[in-house]
Amino acid sequence: MRKRYGLILPCILVLILTTRVYGQENYAAEIRKTANLLYHSFGERQNRSGKLNFTDTSRTQWTNLPIGLRARKGASIGNMTIEQRKLVHRVLSVSLSSQGYLKATSIMHLDDLLDRYFDSLHYKKAFNDTVYHFIKSLQWSHKNFYFAFYEKPTDKVWGYKLEGHHLSVNFTFAGDKVSVTPFFLGTDPAEFPETEYAGWRVLGQEEDLGIKLIHLLNPVQQKKATSSVTVPGDIITSAESGKRLVDVWGIPAAEMNKNQKSILDYIIREFVFNLEYDKAMREYDAILKAGLDNVYFGWIGEYAEDKPHYFILNGPTFLIEFDNNGGPRNGANHIHAIWREKGNDFGEDVLKAHYQTEKH
């Protein structure tokens, strides 16, 4: 019996390790396979707008503004066939986890609801015709999201971007290595106020966990975590600001108790596990390896959901920002959130490693 177990246990270990490695390699391959179908479905006009060189400057640029304020490169969802739209969803569903897929597609759908919401406000005479026409010129619509390829999915180095109002998904591939950031999500409104969608919160979990953590801190910890500056009207590293966060501030997880640290961990997982499981596990493992104790939690603003607030998680390998302020309205019903792999936005690290080992 002992001899039999001696044979079985190594076999089980090999099976586990083989499955893990297969999952890592398979992630890029599965996305490539699905994206290739979409790539070859493009017509002549879509080829011109949606198939770009890897060196095109739009690959390393992003924005969360509506299409009426910032034009996008790529093929628009609105000009795609039904079959092409289905393929876009296939690419998203193989790239993201179920929660990430639902967040991304909900943000797209929310633009349609936002457009109708402004129609209802105008009907109720909440603002005049001049304001209404300006708002409509911003072009809120599910159709105004754009998909762009940077080289072919069959190339060793390629990428894709899906972007529109409050959504920027950026994937970069170098062989089997994948970069997935910056990954931006936003919602306006953060909680939908009316109709059958009343109460819908696309990014509610991110907000609830942040507020829960700041309330779990004792007064001394809260003072250390909280900055006295005014709540920013957007995330600090927004596309329009061009800023980068160099200084680390807030309270380190090393100074938190077990319960506090677990909520900090939940926030990290809420962002990282928007990705397909194998990729998410690799990113999460890297964060744990760098040390959860080395992650800093910072807060700006009130400790209440209905008041403007901002929080940041700054770790050795990643950055998470969350802002609920709403720009010019200075309310607390407009969320911007971002996750970044430090040093690997738009594939900086994976491309550097690829070019060092491959001849070009």
Image: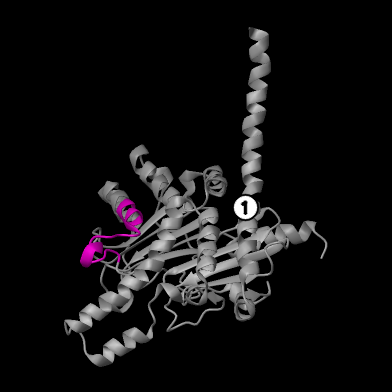
Badge 1, how many Cα within 10 Å: few under 14, some, many 20+?
Answer: some
Q: What residue does disc 1 label?
A: 30
Residue that protrudes farthest toward the left in the picture: 124
Q: Identify the residue at horizontal 64%, vertical 80% (top origin).
A: 44
Q: Quadrant of residue 224?
A: bottom left
Question: In the image, residue 319 lies at what x, y percent?
Answer: 48, 58
Q: Is residue 144 visible?
A: yes
From the viewer's perspective, is 196 left or right of 13?
left
Helix, strand or loop status at disc 1: helix
Q: The C terminus is located in which quarter?
A: bottom right
Q: Identify the residue at horizontal 22%, vertical 83% (top origin).
A: 122
Question: In the image, residue 279 lies at what x, y percent?
Answer: 56, 49
Q: Nearer the viewer, residue 91 or 18?
A: 91
Question: In the image, residue 14 lies at what x, y percent?
Answer: 67, 29
135 is higher (above) or lower (below) than 155: below
Q: Which residues are magenta?
A: 190-209
Q: The N terminus is located in which quarter?
A: top right
Q: Is residue 163 magenta?
A: no
3 is higher (above) or lower (below) than 257: above
Mark 1: amino acid: Glu
How many numbered tags mark residues here?
1
From the viewer's perspective, is 350 left or right of 169?
right
